Image (tube, rainbow, N blue to C red):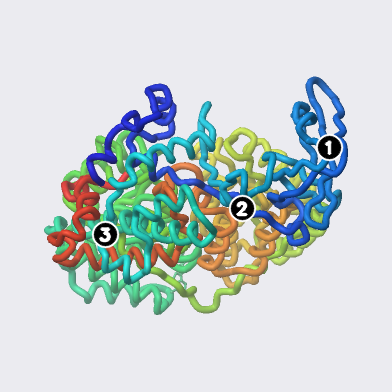
Amino acid sequence: MTEELEKNVTSIRGIGEETASMLATMGIHTVEDLLTYYPFRFEDQRLKDLAEVDHDEKVTVEGSVMSAPSLTFYGRNKSRLAVRVMVGSYLVTAVFFNRPYLKKKLQLNTIVTLSGKWNRHRQQIIVNEVKFGKANHVHMTEFQPFYSVKGDLTSKGIHRFIRLALTQYFHAIEETIPTFLLEKYRLLPRKEAIRAIHFPKNAEEIKQARRRLVYEEFLQFQLKIQALRKIEREKSAGAALSFKNEPLKMMIQSLPFPLTTAQKRVLKEILYDLRSPYRMNRLLQGDVGSGKTVVAAIALFATALSGYQGALMVPTEILAEQHAESIEKLLSPFSVEIALLTGSVKGKRRKEIQAGLEDGRIQIIIGTHALIQEDIQFSNLGLVITDEQHRFGVEQRRILREKGVNPNTLIMTATPIPRTLAITAFGELDISVIDEMPAGRKRVKTYWAKPEMLEQVLSMMERELKKGRQAYVICPLIEESEKLDVQNAIDVHASLVQFFRHRFKIGLMHGRLSPEEKEAVMRDFSENNVHVLVSTTVVEVGVNVPNASMMVIYDAERFGLAQLHQLRGRVGRGNHQSYCILLADPKSETGKERMRIMTETYDGFLLSEKDLKLRGPGDFFGKKQSGLPDFKIADMVHDYRALEVARKDAEMFIQSDEFWTKDEFSRLRRQVEQSGILDGKKLD
Ligand code: ADP
Ligand code: MG
C-alpha cells in the first residue's frame, strides 16, 4: 500500500467530514478502505428480450408508451400508476407505486427505459427505475453494483464516492502480486481489477476482476497463516518428549480391540510430533465413534511415560467424567496417576488435586474449563488435548497452553470440518484425520417422519425397549432460550411417562439440573435403570451408552446437519442395529433437502460439506467463536479452488528466501510484517 492510499477519505475531493464520519461507521477510513469496499452483487441492466426472462427476475427494457396512464389512490398516501408499454413485440403493463407525479411525463409514444421485476403471469413490470429516452441515450450502467450500507448512506452514494476516489487516486493504486504470478494465473493488474469491480463494462470484466481480487485476498490471508505456522514451529524448541516404545506397545495390546489402520496412522503422526523438538500443533478430526478417545489416551500415556504431565480438557462435566472413567480403565494396569477436575470438585479434594498438579504427582488430568482457573498450576505440562474444540474459545486454549512451557497441543473434533474451513479457520495447524470406523459398526438407519407419525414412532420405540434396548429422545431446540428448551423437555418427558406408564422408566436430563442430578440421571441411564432418556442437547457431546439403539429427535429441522450427525452418533455404539428418527415438518425446500441428506448420508465429512454448502460458512460453527476471518470479496465455499491454490503458493513462498528478500514480494511481505505475526502476535 502506498502512503497516498493510506490518507483519510477526507483527502478525496467531494468527501467532507460528515461523509467521512458516516463511512467510518462502516470501517472505511482510508482511501484504500474505500477502494476495497467491494459490491456484494451486481444487477444486470442490459436490455433483454422479455421472452427470455423468467418470472420474478429483474429486467431492464426499452419501449414506447401505448396508453394513457391510469392512476389510483389507496390507503394513506399510496398510489398505483399503470401504463401500457410496447416492448419489442410484447405489450406489457408498467406499474409504478407511489409515484403519481410520473403520470404527466408518461405521454403516448414516449420512449422509456424501465428497470424492475418481471411478472410473467400478468405480463407486468413493477418498475423501480425509469429513464425517459432510449437506453443507450440515458447512460445506464449495464451492471449496477450494490454495496451494503449503514445509516443514511445509500449504495448509490457509496458508488459515487468510489468514483471520486478512483478519479483522484487511480494512478496511486499499486500492484501487490509479483508479475510472474499475474502471468501464471492470467490475473488482471490490481488497478484494472479495482476499476472493473466498481465500474464493470461487462460480465466478463466482473468475473476477471473478482478472480484477481479473490486470489489476492486469499494469498494475503494464507501468507499470514503460513508465517504463523513457521514461527510457531521455529520458536517451539524444548519439549521433545522421550519415551520408550515397549510400554506403549503393551498398552495397545491390552486394549479390548485392535486399533484401526486410521487410528494407527494418526497415532504415528502424533507420537512423532511429541518426540520432535517442535511443538505439536495439531487438529485431530474423526467422525463420531471413530475412536478418538483411545488415541488421546495413548498420547497422554506417552506423555506420562516421558515424565511430563498431560491434560485433557472437555466442554462438559459429564463428558469429563466419562473420559476420566474410560481412560482410567485403559491405563489402570500401568500405574499412572490420573485425576478428574471439574467445577463440582471442591474443598479438600480440589486442594489435593491442585497440590498434585503443582508437584507433578498427578500425571494425567482430565477436566472442564476448571483446568484453566488461575489457582491451577502445573509442574511440567507436556501435552494439552482439547476435545470437541469448536465449543471452546481460542482464548481458553491459549490460557491452558500458557500454563506449560510450549506444551504440545492436540485439538480433537468430532464435527468433521470441511477442508476449506479447516485450512482457513485452523490454517496454522497440522491436520490428522481418522477416516475409518472400527470394524463391525452398523450404520444407524435414519428416517424422516412427520410429527403426525409420532404414534408409529413410539410403537417402534416400544419394540426396541421390549428387546431390552434403550432410547434417547432429543427435545426441540429453541435458540437462545435455555428456559424454553427445558420446558420442552419437561413437557415431552411428561407425555412419554404417560405413554409408557407401568412399562418403562423415563428419565429427564436438561441444563438446569445440578451436576449431581445430571450424574444421577446419566448413571441410571447407563446402568439401564432408566430406559428412555429425554434430553435437551446436553447429550450431544460424547456420552457412551452402547445399549441405546434408538434416538428420536423432535423438530429436527432446527438443528444443523453436523449437530444432528453428532446426536445420531450417540446410538449405534454397540452391536445392535440402531435407528434415528427425525421428527420434522420443514417448510422450506432447504429444510426438506437437509432432512433428505440426513437419511442418505452417513459419512460425517460428506455431510459437513453439504451442510456448508446449504448454510454457508458463517453458520457452520455457530454464531460466535467461528475463528473465521471476514473476507472482503472471497467466499470460502464458492472459491475453494482459489483458496487451495493460494494456500499452496503461500506455503512455498514463506519457506523460500525470495519471499523475504526480493523486491517483487515487498508489498506482500510488508503485510505479513505489519500483522505483527513475526513478533509473536496471534491472528485475531
Ligand atoms: P469418538 O471418536 O466419537 O470420541 P470414542 O473414542 O468414544 O469415539 O469411541 C467410540 C467407541 O468405539 C468406544 O466404545 C471405543 O471403545 C470403541 N473403539 C475405539 N476404537 C476402536 C477400535 N479400533 N475397534 C473397536 N472399537 C473401538
Ligand atoms: Mg469423543
Mark 1 Cα-neighbour bin, 10 Å: few <14, some 14–19, many ≥20: many
Q: Nearer the viewer, residue 47 or 523?
A: 47
Please say whether residue 654 is visible from this viewpoint: yes
Tell me if 38 is positioned left or right of 355 in this view. Answer: right
Report the quarter where the C terminus lies.
top left
> Where on the picture, by quarter, is residue 253?
bottom left
Label 2 belongs to which residue?
A: 44
Q: Which residue is mark 1?
A: 82
| Residue at screen point 67% across, 52% down | 556
Q: Nearer the viewer, mark 2 or mark 3?
A: 2
Identify the amino acid type marked 3.
Answer: Gln
Task: Name the image quarter holding residue 229.
Answer: bottom left
Q: Give how far across and how far down residue 335 sits, in percent.
A: 26, 62
Task: Indicate left or right for 247 with 449 as reference.
Answer: left
Q: Which comes sooner in the sequence, label 2 or label 1?
A: 2
Q: Residue 415 in the image: x percent, y percent?
A: 48, 58
Q: CA distance from mark 2 to mark 1?
A: 24 Å
| Residue 430 % position (x, y) | 31, 64
Three-letter code, disc 2: Asp
Say which quarter of the image contains residue 568: bottom right
Task: Give left or right: position of 594 versus 122.
Answer: left
What residue sits right under mark 3 in the picture? 226
> Please, what secondary structure does the residue beneath circle 2 have?
strand
**Which residue appears at 65% of the width and 67% of the height?**
578
Q: Earlier in the sequence, mark 1 or mark 3?
A: 1
What amino acid is at disc 1? Answer: Ala
Residue at 54%, 59% (x, y): give it.
203
Q: Nearer the viewer, mark 1 or mark 3?
A: 1
Residue ranking furthest to the top: 76
The mark that comes first in sequence, 2 or 3, is 2
